[in-house]
């Protein structure tokens, strides 16, 4: 296959395995070029003609550089090193492995277990179902891989397939799992809320924080404790635009400015405004001026 096809296939496989960092992807795509060092006409072969010439002279085409016997152990070494260099080695080897696997769809196939065996491995019982380099089918493969990669990136941005399933079915448990991954970013639960008195209400509710047995949300400027005060029939998680600011107070303090915040004590969240006292873990979105109380 042409170099862009190998790039796009490595990107797609990497995304499916959760490798999405820019530098990680670049290293993986570089690794996807390494097997073609045995071809002086390839993209990387033209960059390193001296290396390409000697590799071809030693091993021939699509043999050692296309073998899992080479790249598999290298990937293992990268994992065992447990360092930045080890991670780089793993990414390069991982990219090379994707190249070898994709080349199994090539008309010529690959000696993917060389030198253990010289058997040629190819996907497809007939050459007419395999891919000729730089052919129409090669470009179609490129387009398919790029399209699926873009879809994978979008899926990752919204929280992965689990988040999409949770959004479709309206699962409260999946929504909360997605919320827990947000760190200090604000979040909302949108859905149908059933109160203990039987009242049902639909809306979008700010998540204040996790409690011992559930979660605290804001409904009409009041803290509602889920599932003690109400339960969601169905809900979906939405990420907010702001981040919570956090404080951990060692004593009792009083709010001096016209703002609001939330504080947690005994694993339960409470709401506070100007002139209210707060203590314990405190979260807020705007400016917060506090005064230390010597007596309470």
Image (spheres, rainbow, N blue to C red):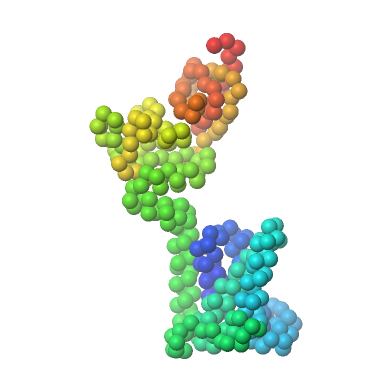
Residue drawn at 44 percent across, 40 percent down: 187
Is residue 226 among the parts visible in the rendering?
yes
Vertical placement of 1 versus 225: above or below? Answer: below
Name the spot of residue 244 as percent of width and height, x first: 52, 35
Q: Quadrant of residue 189?
A: top left
Residue projecting furthest to the top: 295
Question: Image height check: is 24 above or below 280?
Answer: below
Residue extending farthest to the front is 116
Question: Can residue 84 be seen by looking at this rendering?
Answer: no
The image quadrant where one finds the N terminus is bottom right
**Residue 295 percent coordinates (x, y):** 57, 10
Image quadrant where one finds the C terminus: top right
Q: Residue placed at 44% from the left, 89% from the top?
A: 126
x then y, percent, for residue 192: 30, 40
For residue 17, above or below residue 7: above
Query: Is residue 31 toward the left or the right of residue 267 in the image?
Result: right
The residue that appears at 51% across and 18% down in the rendered structure is 277
Q: How many marks?
A: 0
Which residue occupies 65% across, 66% down?
76
- Of 130 and 274, nearer the camera is 130
From the top left corner, tell me how far across and down residue 291 is, in percent.
58, 17
Q: Nearer the viewer, residue 111 or 253?
A: 111
């Amino acid at each position: 296959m042409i170099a862009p096809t190998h790039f796009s296939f490595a990107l797609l496989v990497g995304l499916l395995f959760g490798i999405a960092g820019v530098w990680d992807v670049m290293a993986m795509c570089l690794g996807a070029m390494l097997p073609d060092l045995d071809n002086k006409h390839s993209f990387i072969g033209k960059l390193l003609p001296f290396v390409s010439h000697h590799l071809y002279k030693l091993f021939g085409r699509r043999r050692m550089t296309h073998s899992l016997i080479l790249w598999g152990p290298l990937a293992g070494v990268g994992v065992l090193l447990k360092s930045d260099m080890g991670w780089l080695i793993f990414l390069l080897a991982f990219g090379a492995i994707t190249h070898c696997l994709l080349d199994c769809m090539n008309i010529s196939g690959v000696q993917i277990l060389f030198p253990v065996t010289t058997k040629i491995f190819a996907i497809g019982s007939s050459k007419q179902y395999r891919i000729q380099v730089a052919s129409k089918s090669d470009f179609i493969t490129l387009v398919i891989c790029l399209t699926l990669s873009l879809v994978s990136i979008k899926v990752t941005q919204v929280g992965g397939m689990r988040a999409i399933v949770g959004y479709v079915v309206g699962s409260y448990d999946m929504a909360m799992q997605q919320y827990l991954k947000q760190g200090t970013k604000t979040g909302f639960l949108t859905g149908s809320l059933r109160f203990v008195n039987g009242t049902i209400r639909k809306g979008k509710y700010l998540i204040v924080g996790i409690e011992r047995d559930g979660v605290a949300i804001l409904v009409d400027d009041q803290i509602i404790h889920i599932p003690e005060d109400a339960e969601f029939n169905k809900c979906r998680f939405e990420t907010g635009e702001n981040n919570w600011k956090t404080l951990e107070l060692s004593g009792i303090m009083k709010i001096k400015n016209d703002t609001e915040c939330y504080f947690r004590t005994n694993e339960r969240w409470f709401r506070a405004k100007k002139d209210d006292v707060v203590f314990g873990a405190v979260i807020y979105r705007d400016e917060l001026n506090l005064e230390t109380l010597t007596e309470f």
